[in-house]
Amino acid sequence: MALRGTMIVLGVLFVLGTSGIAASAPDSGPDPGNFVSRVDNPWFPLVPGTTFVYRGVKDGKSARDVFTVAHATKTIQGVRCTAVQDRLYLAGRLEERTTDWYAQDLRGNVWYFGESTAELDRSGRVTSTEGSWQAGRDGAQAGIYMTARPTVGQSRRQEYYKGHAEDHFSILSLRARSRCLS
């Protein structure tokens, strides 16, 4: 599927870092009037019902990450956000379940408004919710997850909740190669 290939390329294009990061939003949050109802950014389209599966290795264990765009939405700071269910399996066992919230502005940038994360023990009980955050609460701020027109050298803050969630990205290449395992 073309979308799956696009999503895998995203993993190649971005690297987390901390230098040269542009601010993503003022403390008051982005203007809700500057957002549209769907996320159709060609680099990060979120069509409800779509599922992406990523495979790799984490902490020496085989990893499978199942990323499903839900039909549900949540209003955060006056902005209607699309919910994405993210399930991380390590060595075949569900280790983490997360709901992420994204919205797209009029320019086509995709914003990240928060996540509700639960780490699970072997019995499926929640052991930690560290890393959960929502824009507008306790100083947390939405950030740009995917720009409308990515260019090499762009970097942005994707999320900000001091001491808990401080991811950034930098675009290294728009021509990196990847392959899809079907």
Image (cartoon, rainbow, N blue to C red):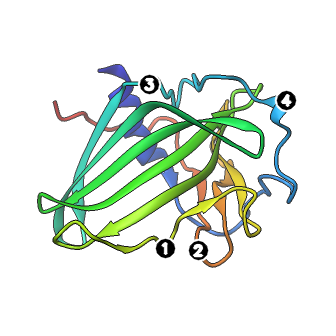
Residue type for callout 4 = Gly
Would you name the residue on which mark 2 appears?
Answer: 164
Residue type for callout 2 = His
Lower sequence index among marks 2 and 3: 3
Would you name the residue on which mark 1 appears?
Answer: 130
> Do the residues bearing badges 1 and 2 touch, measured as CB atoms within 8 Å?
yes
Q: Is residue 70 above or below residue 27?
A: above
| Element type at mark 4 | helix
Q: Give percent across and percent down for residue 150.
A: 63, 36
Q: Is residue 175 above or below residue 121?
A: above
Would you name the residue on which mark 4 appears?
Answer: 33
Lower sequence index among marks 4 and 1: 4
Residue 102: quadrant of the picture = top right
| Element type at mark 3 | loop
* Mark-to-mark CA distance, 1 and 3: 27 Å
Residue type for callout 1 = Glu
Would you name the residue on which mark 3 appears?
Answer: 48
| Element type at mark 1 | loop
> Do the residues bearing badges 4 and 3 touch, measured as CB atoms within 8 Å?
no
From the image, which quarter does the N terminus lie in? top left
Question: Toward the viewer: 110 or 14?
Answer: 110
From the image, which quarter does the C terminus lie in? top left
Q: Residue at x 59, y 26 (%)?
A: 39
Query: Of tags 1 and 2, which is closer to the observer?
Result: 1
